[in-house]
């Protein structure tokens, strides 16, 4: 009998990417299983690129209110699952899982969740330091020895790439450097626009194309980067949807990105990625790829995991120079 599994997805795009090894492991342990994902609308394009997923169900609840009754009603509409795996650690996320009536409700203990989960796991944060491992380990039975995670690998179809290229009047030649200057978490994850502009000038001078990726919130900062770089970049922020951004990122020979969802996507489509880290810990959520390098200064005050620099200087990013990042990108370009 086919096992049916429902995943309650995280909200952040990067976390969504890091869940894919979990689904791969579930298929290994339960051949022929059906995995559906309950995910926010803004992240659904990521799951569409995972062949392990059978169906994506929109999670209509944003950040904020508990909305207990509405969540319970939504969960009651999701019947027929043998197991629900809850990836976020909030109480809100487990309400839907409990309402499904699934016999096995798996997740970490988290926020007031005893009773809501009947397969509750205690998270050993040191044993499972990598975020991707915390997700993947939930495929195992309680107490089972964890064997590690594979890398995420999002599917990209050439025909969809060609449609996106045509839509935005883009070509694959000359070489493309993609810059991703945004980060939803806060300014302590964002490399200086001046540094991105210097990087853009460097590649434009070598005859490369430079494409700027991000959400509508990143349009203005990317436009300032373009202006500081002499106006030779293509600012795609807020123009592409997430699916198009995935396809176009996969066209790039190189990517420089903050620790962000787009950085994790670029790694998962096989780009050569230089990931810039400031306040966050590259040992916890690095780019999961053999063709990625981490650019960080390893200052005594970082990683602090704060949205804004508590010391007011953001030296961890401001003193990370374009030359350092460009050197990392050039070293990556020499690898096969």
Image (tube, grey):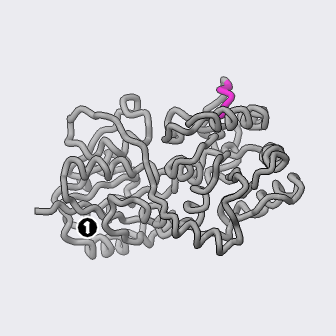
Q: Quadrant of residue 211?
A: bottom right
Q: Which residue does the image show at 70% across and 58% down from the upper left?
A: 173
Give whichever of 327, 10 is nearer the camera.
Answer: 327
On whether residue 296 falls in the magenta region, the answer is yes
Q: Is residue 194 visible?
A: no
Q: Which residue does the image show at 67% across and 45% down from the upper left?
A: 256
Q: Quadrant of the C terminus?
A: top right
Q: Tag 1, which secondary structure?
A: helix
Question: How many other residues sit within 10 Å of disc 1, few (<14), some (14-19) or many (≥20)?
Answer: some
Q: Residue 31 at what x, y percent from top left?
A: 19, 54
Q: Residue furthest top?
A: 300
Q: Quadrant of residue 83?
A: bottom left
| Span shown in magenta | 295-299
Judge whether 130 appears above or below 225 on screen.
above
* Side of 289 where 313 appears, left or right: right
Disc 1: which residue: 99
Q: Residue 139 at what x, y percent from top left?
A: 26, 46
Q: Which residue does the image show at 44% across and 72% down from the upper left?
A: 60
Judge whether 165 appears above or below 288 on screen.
below
Q: Residue furthest front?
A: 173
* Side of 13 where 35 appears, left or right: left
Q: Which residue does the image show at 46% across and 66% down from the upper left?
A: 44
Q: Residue 279 at what x, y percent from top left?
A: 64, 37
Q: Residue 251 at what x, y percent from top left?
A: 61, 57
Give whichever of 106, 178 is nearer the camera.
Answer: 178
Q: Is residue 3 visible?
A: yes
Predominant SS of the magenta segment: loop
């Amino acid at each position: 009998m086919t096992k049916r599994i429902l995943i309650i997805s995280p909200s952040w795009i990067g976390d969504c990417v890091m869940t894919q090894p979990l689904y791969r492991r579930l298929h290994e342990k339960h051949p022929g299983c059906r995995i559906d994902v309950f995910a926010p609308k803004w992240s659904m394009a990521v799951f569409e690129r995972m062949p392990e997923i059978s169906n994506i169900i929109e999670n209509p609840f944003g950040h904020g209110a508990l909305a207990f009754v509405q969540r319970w009603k939504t969960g009651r509409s999701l019947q027929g699952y043998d197991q629900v795996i809850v990836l976020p650690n909030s109480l809100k996320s487990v309400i839907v899982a409990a309402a499904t009536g699934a016999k096995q409700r798996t997740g970490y203990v988290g926020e007031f969740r005893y009773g809501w989960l009947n397969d509750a796991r205690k998270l050993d944060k040191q044993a499972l330091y990598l975020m991707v491992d915390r997700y993947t380990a939930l495929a195992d039975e309680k107490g089972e020895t964890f064997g590690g995670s594979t890398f995420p690998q999002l599917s990209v179809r050439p025909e969809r790439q060609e449609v996106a290229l045509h839509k935005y009047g883009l070509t694959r030649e000359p070489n493309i450097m993609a810059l991703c200057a945004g980060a939803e978490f806060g300014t302590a994850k964002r490399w200086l626009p001046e540094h991105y502009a210097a990087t853009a000038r460097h590649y434009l001078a070598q005859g490369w194309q430079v494409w700027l990726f991000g959400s509508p919130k990143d349009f203005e900062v990317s436009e300032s980067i373009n202006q500081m770089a002499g106006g030779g970049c293509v600012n795609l922020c807020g123009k592409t949807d997430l699916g198009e951004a995935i396809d176009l990122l996969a066209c790039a020979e190189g990517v420089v990105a903050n620790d962000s969802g787009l950085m994790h996507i670029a790694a998962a489509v096989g780009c050569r990625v230089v990931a810039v880290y400031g306040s966050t810990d590259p040992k916890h959520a690095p780019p999961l790829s053999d063709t990625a390098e981490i650019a960080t200064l390893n200052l005594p005050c970082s990683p602090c995991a704060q949205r804004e620099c508590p010391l007011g200087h953001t030296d961890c990013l401001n003193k990370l120079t374009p030359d350092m990042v460009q050197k990392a990108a050039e070293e990556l370009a020499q690898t096969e």
